[in-house]
Amino acid sequence: MKLIVAIVQDKDSAKLLSDLVDHNFRATKLATTGGFLKSGNTTFMIGTEEIRVNKALEIIKRNCQAREQYVAPVSPIGGNADSYIPYPVEVEVGGATVFVLPVDQFYHF
């Protein structure tokens, strides 16, 4: 048994959940916040048999593609904010960060 923890951008979460359900994966969806962009993302917890891990990873990869997006940088703390002009910066967002963890015991009541 394995536990897949997948952190994806909110924009990709509905499409990913639908595809997981279509392929008979059970998933718990958690609303989370990223530390880098301070924006919302979604964390999926997926429990599955070891032989189905590659299929789950394939579904995650297919639904969570990286893309470029412009964001306004945060103003500096402690500095002179009067002369600070926040020009948008292009960053890569999306994709997925995935952890596959072993599960010693699993119970379903």
Image (spheres, helix red, strand yellow):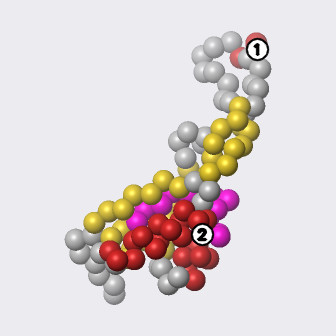
Q: Residue furthest bottom?
A: 109
* Towards the viewer: 87 or 84: 87
Magenta residues (range): 4-16
Amino acid type at circle 1 is Asp
Specify which label sits upstream in the sequence, 2 or 1: 2
SS under mark 2: helix
Residue count near mark 1 (Cα–Cα under 10 Å), binned few <14, some 14–19, many ≥20: few
- In x, y percent, where is residue 37? 61, 40
Quarter placement of the N terminus? bottom left
For residue 91, above or below residue 14: above
In this view, 58 is above or below 51: above
For disc 2, the marked residue is 16
**Disc count in the image?**
2
Q: How far apart are labels 2 and 1 at the CA level?
A: 43 Å
Q: In the picture, residue 22 is in which quadrant? A: bottom right
Instruction: Describe residue 74's horizontal placement relative to residue 51 as left or right.
Output: right
Out of 93 and 38, give the one closest to the viewer. 93
Residue at image coords 65%, 70%? 15
Indicate left or right for 72 with 3 as reference. right
Q: Percent x, y for residue 35?
A: 53, 42
Q: Is residue 27 visible?
A: yes
Q: Amino acid at mark 2?
A: Leu
Residue 12 highlighted magenta (yes or no)? yes
Quadrant of the drawing holding the C terminus: bottom left
Query: Does residue 47 sit above or below 108 in this rendering?
Result: above
The stretch drawn in magenta includes residue 23: no
Secondary structure state at the residue bearing disc 1: helix
The residue at the point 27 percent across, 70 percent down is: 103
Task: Choose mark 2 or mark 1, whichever is in front.
Answer: 2
Which residue is identified by label 1? 82
Q: Position of residue 52 (x, y in %)?
A: 39, 77
Q: Decide which of 81, 19 is in the foreground and name it.
A: 19
